[in-house]
Image (tube, coloured by chain):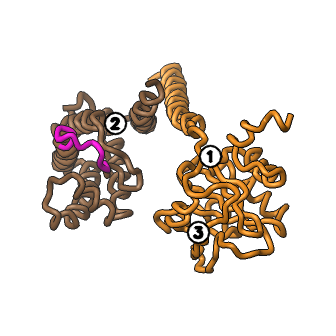
Chain colours: A orange, B brown
Amino acid sequence: MTTAGWIAISVLWILVLVLCVALLALARQIGVLHERLQPVGALSLPKGVKVGDTAPQVDVETVTGARLTIGGGQVRAADQLVVFVSPTCPVCKALLPSLRAIRRSEKSLVEVILASDGDQSEHVTFIQNNSLTDFPYVLSEALGLAFGAGRLPHAVLIDRTGIVRASGLVNSREHLDSLFEARDRGVGTLQDYLEKADAYI
Amino acid sequence: MMPDAALTWIVVAALCALLVVAALGKLADLAKFSAAIQGYRLVPPGLAGLASLALPCLELAAAGCLLIPSLRTAGAWLAAGLLASYAAAMAINLARGRSNLDCGCFGPARRERIASWMVVRNLVLAALALALTVPPPSRALEALDWLTISAGTFATVCLYLAIETLARNQPIIRSARS
């Protein structure tokens, strides 16, 4: 085999391998892009609770074993923000940094609780991979049913007197922040805002 | 039969990689893999536990035999048999109209549903394994052959993964279009 032959074949192999890797990367990106583009679905009013009602009381246990009471008529020190998430929901993952920020900045004002249901081991990995150990993390189907969390991520804001102030699908940091704005202005849902939009402009 | 010894090595190495990855994925969660086998409704439920251990062990055995030239023919028959029977199991269930079951192919962690392209994939892989049952004309391998074998194996694995990813994206793209 001559030197020229060796060089020709080596160069061809390098090109083939680079092309193979690029093709694989592109194929994977199609899947990832689709995940990102996944429609969050129509914003529907939750069936479980109505804004302005007293939140139903649900006693739950966090994954670490601590007992927690969500809702109920009693007066507490801080608001409760219950965010229903799932390890398989890409939009939920995108929201996690915002939730951490809210937990830090509004620590005395709001208690952020993450809720989900299903296999515990899957959630423990999710908590570890996304460093969510600081959050109370609840696995309870009853909680999801009580608050009508159909589409994820779903957030419910319960004020300190136990009244539901906002409830619905949230899909961005702005949306999440707007829950607090909504609480302050007394707007419960997006539909509610759109109906009364004229009054705000 | 493969036309050349270098080509044989590429197919051997790629098939071994596939069998080992598949076997380890299955061994990682035997309980769920056993449930996946029961989902196929082809073996009696009592035997699913045994099958869930036997299948990955057979896959590892096939991979090991393929790597040893004197045992290659036996390993090739075993690999071809396994791949063809997986294809048959999926084809039977697809024909029954039961496409909504866990494939279990690379272990239950992947949570993949069976589909017709997997039957084709397994038949192609079985045909490749079958081609290894007849040894190629013997020839001394030189340095350039080893470059061909190593780069060729890497390229084959990459292309396999790319094709599989594209096939898996297919239903998503189809549902997005409609």
Quadrant (top left, top right, bottom left, bottom right) of the C terminus of chain B:
top left
Q: Residues within 10 Å of mark 1 (few under 14, many from 20)?
A: many
Residue A112 rendering spot, x and y as whole percentages: 72, 64
- Kindly identify the amino acid type of the residue bearing the numbered disc 3: Val
At horizontal 23% and vertical 44% (from top left) the residue drawn is B98
Q: Tell me if mark 3 has few (under 14), some (14-19) or many (20+) residues whose alpha carbon lies within 10 angstroms of its own.
A: many
Front residue (pair A83, A79): A79
Residue at mark 3: chain: A
Relative placement, left or right, of B175 versus B98 is: right
- Please name the predominant secondary structure of the magenta segment in the image: loop
Q: Is residue B97 magenta?
A: yes
Query: Foreground: A182 or B57?
Result: A182
Q: Nearer the viewer, mark 1 or mark 2?
A: 1
Q: Which residues are magenta?
A: B93-103
Residue at screen point 15% across, 67% down:
B46
Instruction: Residue B148: give x, y in percent of width and height.
Output: 41, 32
Q: Work out whether residue B73 can be spotted.
A: no
Q: Amino acid at mark 1?
A: Val
* Residue depicted at x 35% and y 50%: B106
Label 1 marks which chain's residue? A
Q: Which residue is mark 3?
A: A138
Residue at which label 1 appears: A91
B85 relative to A126, above or below:
above
Instruction: In this rendered view, identify the residue nearer to me: A83 or B16.
Output: A83
Label 2 belongs to which residue?
Answer: B141
Helix, strand or loop at label 1? It is: helix
Q: For the point 17% across and 38% down, which residue is it?
A: B95
Query: Looking at the rendering, in which quadrant would you find the N terminus of chain B?
Result: top left
